[in-house]
Amino acid sequence: MISLLWVDLAAASTLVLALALLNMRLRLGQSRQLLVSTGRMFIQLALVGFMLKALFTYQNILIVSAIAIVMIMVAGYEIVSRQHRRFVDGWSFSLGVTSMFVSSLTLAVFALVVLIEPAPWYSPQYAIPLLGMLLGNTMNGISLALDRLTEDAWQQQAAIEGQLMLGKTSREAILPIERDSLRSALTPTINAMAVSGIVALPGMMTGQIMAGADPLDAVKYQILIMLLIATGVGFGSLIAVWFGARRLFDNRQRLRLDRLRSL
């Protein structure tokens, strides 16, 4: 594997700087966001790299579990921050964390124990990257699903209440919005799976091949990851939307948009 120097990454970062200057020139209003995101990415990944390098020398399930919990909590916060209309009283955060815990963490443990079988099964070399990939994609799916659910419920308030007045249950009134929300969550994953290997080479597989791994082994791991991601996004979004839709109504099946607040 050919090692990169930090100065190489600094040189590559000038390309993003040029893009930010062009963005500023065109008055697109994203130059500051682009630079801040690039800086965050650089610092976060560098810290993770140093942390993982130290972590790989210790096979401690308590440390791995603590890191997994922190990752899930941070992902839950990111879900909340991306919502235009969020539930009050911390419900958006709770929905996000619960959905990812049930879907991503369960799938990661299943893959480690049953499919990959490292020794020990919680080996940080496998557990942390696998969970990170699952959480990243599941987080995006849940965020899209909840944002679509709350925004459509807000925009279609009159239509929902009209259906309730006609005798439909809250479940029947919100069902079309639930379906649209789940479609929004799954569409990016379905599109990514459809073009993998033809239009684009997925990042994990590309990284393994560049690191010197056998291409067929890299392909097998990538297929496994894509299957786990699709399952995690699907079930995680389903859990979030189901509980979120229930939260939009009270015990008397009245639409309660006062349980949402806008940013």
Image (cartoon, rainbow, N blue to C red):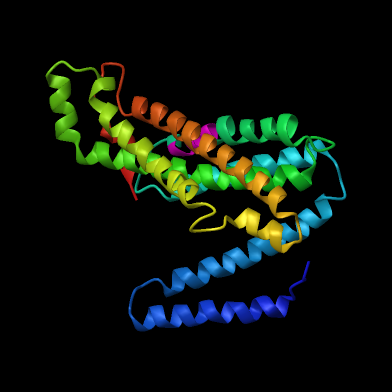
| 14 w.r.t. 32: above or below | below
User: Which image quarter holds the N terminus?
Assistant: bottom right
At horizontal 51% and vertical 72% (from top left) the residue drawn is 35
The percent position of residue 120, horizontal first and vertical second, equals 84, 36
**Quadrant of residue 203 within the rendered picture:** bottom right
The percent position of residue 140, horizontal first and vertical second, equals 47, 47
Which one is in front, 134 or 200? 200
At horizontal 77% and vertical 54% (from top left) the residue drawn is 52
- Is residue 82 visible in the rendered image? The answer is yes
Residue furthest right in the image: 57
192 sits left or right of 213 in the view: left
- Is residue 70 visible in the rendered image? The answer is no
The percent position of residue 172, horizontal first and vertical second, equals 25, 21
At horizontal 52% and vertical 52% (from top left) the residue drawn is 196
The percent position of residue 259, horizontal first and vertical second, equals 32, 34
44 sits left or right of 239 in the view: right
| 3 w.r.t. 67: above or below | below
The stretch drawn in magenta includes residue 137: no
The stretch drawn in magenta includes residue 94: yes
Tell me where the magenta segment starts and ends, as one range. 92-99
Which one is in front, 243 or 212? 212
52 sits left or right of 92 in the view: right
At horizontal 53% and vertical 32% (from top left) the residue drawn is 98
